[in-house]
Amino acid sequence: MTFTLEEIYETTNMILHQNLDIRTATLGINLKDLIDSDFESFRRKVYDRIVSHGGKLIEQSGILERKYGIPIVNKRIAITPVSLIMESHCSFEKYAQMAETLDIAAKDAGIDFIGGFGALVQKGMTRSDRMLVDVLPEILSTTERVCAFLNVGSNVSGLNMDAVNLLGGMLKKTARISASSVGCAKFVVFVNAPEDNPFMAGAFHGVGEGDATLNIGISGPGVVKSVVEKNRDCDLTRLSEVIKGTVFKITRSGELIGRELAAALGIHFGIVDISLASTTATGDSVANVLEAFGIEKIGTHGSTLALALLMNAVKKGGAMASGNVGGLSGTFIPISEDAGMIEAVQCGALGLDKLEALTAVCSVGLDMFAVPGDTPDETINAIIADELAIGIVNNKTTGVRIIPAFGKKAGEMIQFGGLLGTVPVMKVNPYSAKAFLNRGGRLPAPVTSMRN
């Protein structure tokens, strides 16, 4: 891969002035071969592998940051879904001990987060899967770096409502026993979860992967906003072309770093995830990109069209630049991590219903939003199920990170700090779907499941 002097200049300008970065380098590692009937031996081997791989990731990432001047903001590890490797050690105490081992190993290696404390339960739950859900409140509230997930459905299997119905109570307990309810921010529930997603909280090393794989997540809302602001009078077709060209350049930078880092680690390069991911930094807001299109405040009428245009252009630009695009690839619209989204909620432009509508055209789903702490369990489950149904029917990944803010009412704020930012508590519909959800069972898969 070669670059012209003009491309190098443009990339330098993006880094210095428009918040371009490699959002995450996520190393996926297989742990299945470490399973041991001796649990203490098993834990030691898991610790050693994570520290060994993680230390190399930190070292080589630093070398590339200095070489190219592109920040690699987060260094992360994703592991084999824990429920698969804990089948023969299925107890509350051993699950908790394994989580502690993962947390300590990540800290000792210098890794920001470790993902994969989760399960694939789209058609049913094993005893190990069920134990994992039971232990999640303790894990999410007592560990610092462990992230968890459940995949509860797909367009092939449908939606496992029996699994969804466990989540409201689990999340409210997690919120109650963790500081500022922050434990909930480390858990995501998916349908159609990709096995190569580099972003937390949903990253895991899928069963279809090799022993070790490096996946790169790039971002650049500030870069896209800059070019949009320079093209205020063009029509939508031209606007799409401008964004495509910009994302092409961003993706090429990410692939260069990813391939060189994978080679330095001596492992397989996986994918580039081309998602536009917000941060709390000034100028790094996806909402502000849409407002630069001409939307007064995200959430008003026209916002879904604007987001659809942005998503389409981002995907096309990334696909032109790399043959290894994967993960979620699209646009995140979290509340807490995006200053423009927070402002839109606070001024009344954006409510929960419109946020759900926006997810029909974005790639991620309902992300990092808060609801009152006294929201009934079944209402939380219904919010989750509504969003996941969008993913199943539309054959796309959707996920939910919902925070039932303990002790908080609609309109109040929660301060998380750091990358997780600040989140306003959103009002929920007061009416109930309890009788419907209590039917349980599985939402049948749509006819796309029969395409074979």
Image: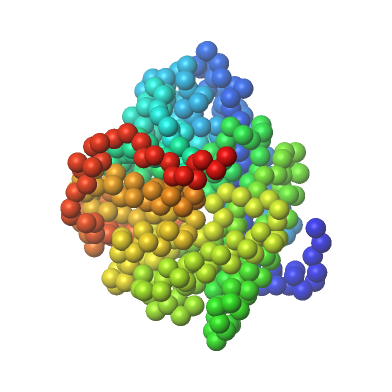
The location of residue 241, given as percent across then percent down, is 63, 74
Say which quarter of the image contains residue 212. top right
Q: Is residue 14 above or below residue 42?
A: below
Q: How many marks?
A: 0
Please name whichever residue, 26 or 313, is drawn nearer the observer in this view of the structure.
313
Against 324, residue 301 (above or below) is: below
Measured as percent of width and height from the top left, residue 322 is found at 70, 56
In the picture as drawn, the residue positioned furthest to the bottom comes out as 233
Q: Quadrant of the N terminus?
A: bottom right
Which residue appears farthest toward the left when viewing the image?
Answer: 431
Q: Which residue is drawn at the image coordinates 49% and 50% (left, top)?
A: 396
Position of residue 287 relative to residue 156, above or below, is: below
List x then y, in percent, for residue 208: 62, 34
> Residue drawn 23% across and 42% down?
436
Looking at the picture, does residue 344 appear above or below residue 152? below
Is residue 89 visible from the viewing direction of this image? yes
Residue occupying image coordinates x 26% and y 41%: 437
Q: Is residue 431 left or right of residue 75?
A: left
How is the model colour-coded? rainbow
Picture quadrant of residue 248: bottom right
Left or right: 287 with respect to 164? Answer: right
Quarter of the figure that contains the C terminus: top right
Is residue 250 visible in the rendered image? The answer is no
Q: Horizontal and vertical percent for residue 79?
A: 55, 34
Identify the residue at image location x=52%, y=69%.
Answer: 309
